[in-house]
Image: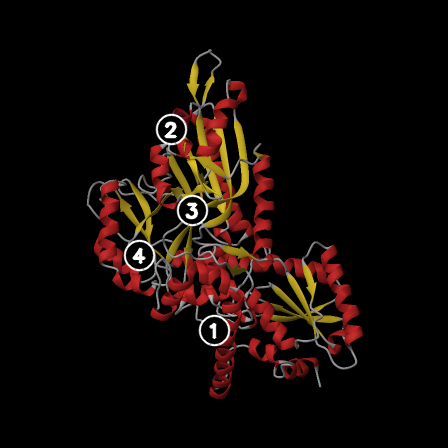
Amino acid sequence: MSDQDQKKTDQNKPQNKDQQKGQNKPQNKDQQKGQNKGQNKGQNKGQNQGQNKGQNKGQNKGQNQGQNKGQNKGQNKGQNKGQQKKESEDVGSHLLGITASRESDFSEWYTQVVVRTEMIEYYDISGCYILRPWSFAMWESIQHFFDKEIKKLGVKNAYFPLFVSEKALNAEKDHIEGFAPEVAWVTKSGNSDLKEHIAVRPTSETIMYPIYAKWIRSHRDLPLKLNQWNNVVRWEFKHPVPFLRSREFLWQEGHSVFADQKGAEEEVFQILDLYAKVYEELLAVPVVKGKKSENEKFAGGFFTTTCEVFVPPNGRAIQAATSHCLGTNFAKMFHIEYEGENGEKQLAWQNSWGLSTRSIGVIVMVHGDNKGLRLPPRVAPIQVVIVPIYKKTNQDTLNAKGDELAKALSEAGIRAHYDNRTNYNPGWKYNDWEKRGVPIRLEIGDKDLQNNAVMSCRRDNGKKESLSQTGLAQKIGEMLEDIHKSLYEQAKKIRDERTVKVTKFDDFVSALNAGNIVLVPWCEEKKCEEQVKKKSGEASKLAQENDSKFELTGSAKSLCIPLQQNELPHDSVCFSCEAKAKSWTLFGRSY
């Protein structure tokens, strides 16, 4: 029997019950019936025993009546069906393949992917999630890449406290007004009420800037460029979604101070370019760089720049990272002044900029398919997995060769793993690693040993190719680069095809409903944007129903005014209010 025949035979012969559950979608009715029966029975048992025993005491006391009521009626206060269903996933759900369709049930697909690939685990506080090693390794790659780049600009890392006093938080009214509904407060210490309530940081401007006012006295103290890698809490009232909208998340926040507007604005765009590099050069995700409208800019800021990403399955956009010029607004409030070279007191110019773990959710949404993740190689925790095709007599030989190949790849700077588990057959392993998104799988059996070869399989397109073991590391390195390029070009092609230019509101909603983002001539007025939100929401009931699990409205808003502008005819009028148009602006439905 050839190695390929052996592979097929192995795939059809799961060695234990867990493997049987882990196989791909059933191919016939009997198999469907068997899998549904087994899965439902196992899942119900896992929910009844695992959740009721493992979480009962903590969760039932905190959520008891609300959650049980929500599960019986289908929706609970503050949570919806999807959240409750996912929070009761049985312990062994990661053994299952992805059963939801990315095209027809995107929110369910997304939830299955982040849970069943062991990216996150649900916690007993709604909106808070455990980042498991598979996803945290991606965040570490992003951290390493970006941290290295900002240090080239003279940025230094620091750490400021988690808490902010009520007085400091309320010092900048326009700023806190944007965050007020999301602020979490500490009001008690043990059994005693605190005299002054303490907020958990939703962002750190009001924590850092009173200290900046102490540190900055002279123009010689500028520029001051600090960054911190930390967590923030925003107590979202909307339905939380892992990575995309959570009550606690990880991010970096940079806060810089300059003597003048020129220095501040220069850095704003330098950081924006670095964010674009993170997405395009690391995550293989194309972005649109632009400025936010007055309605959408950072509360209390001078102007906001953004990287926007298109999400193909539902035609929405997501704000991927922002770089804000704060002007002198915060300097006025927090008395950040310096003595200029002429001896006069002047207000400092400031910036703030942030990138969060939302970036991991973007990877899932943009690159994933119906098998699960397709990870861009530069952030994949494992870039190459080697799977042996065991027979009764070849295990020691294959293990020796597999370890040798993994070591050689690792020494060449490639993150390689040899999967020598004996309780799962090759077919099960193939499915499991495909689900997790590992860019390249190498298969090795007796025939491959005889030919000094391995069989490679790419996760991005499924292409299989026999490769010589001689010079393997170089070939794998080239293949990883090609996978990155392929993922990026595929995502960019889809985005460009679904970026539609229209000039009239009548065509605007139909373009949105077709799953597009829309480039329009726009007047840039606040009242006009408010009317666009209202009118598009009323005309888009269908989109709201389809995205009910994410609780996203059908309203459209401005995403950004792209920095790269096509020429606007001099007689152009706004697509909505018909006033004089000032720019081509990207509108769409957004997360």
In the rendered view, would you say 169 is above or below 61? above
Mark 2 touching mark 1, by CB under 8 A?
Answer: no
Q: Is residue 14 above or below residue 54?
A: below
Left or right relative to 365: residue 405: right
Q: Is residue 12 visible?
A: yes
Q: Which quadrant of the rendered structure holds the N terminus?
A: bottom right
Circle 2 — which element? helix
Q: Nearer the viewer, residue 194 or 350?
A: 194
Mark 2 → mark 4, Cα distance in angstroms: 32 Å
- Rendered location of residue 33, percent (x, y): 47, 85
Alpha-carbon distance for marks 4 and 3? 20 Å
Question: Within the image, what quadrant is residue 413 found in?
Answer: bottom right
From the image, tell me which residue sits under label 2. Answer: 329
Q: Is residue 107 visible?
A: no
When asked about the image quadrant of residue 485, the answer is bottom right
Q: How many marks?
A: 4
User: Disc 3 versus disc 2: distance between alpha carbons?
Assistant: 23 Å
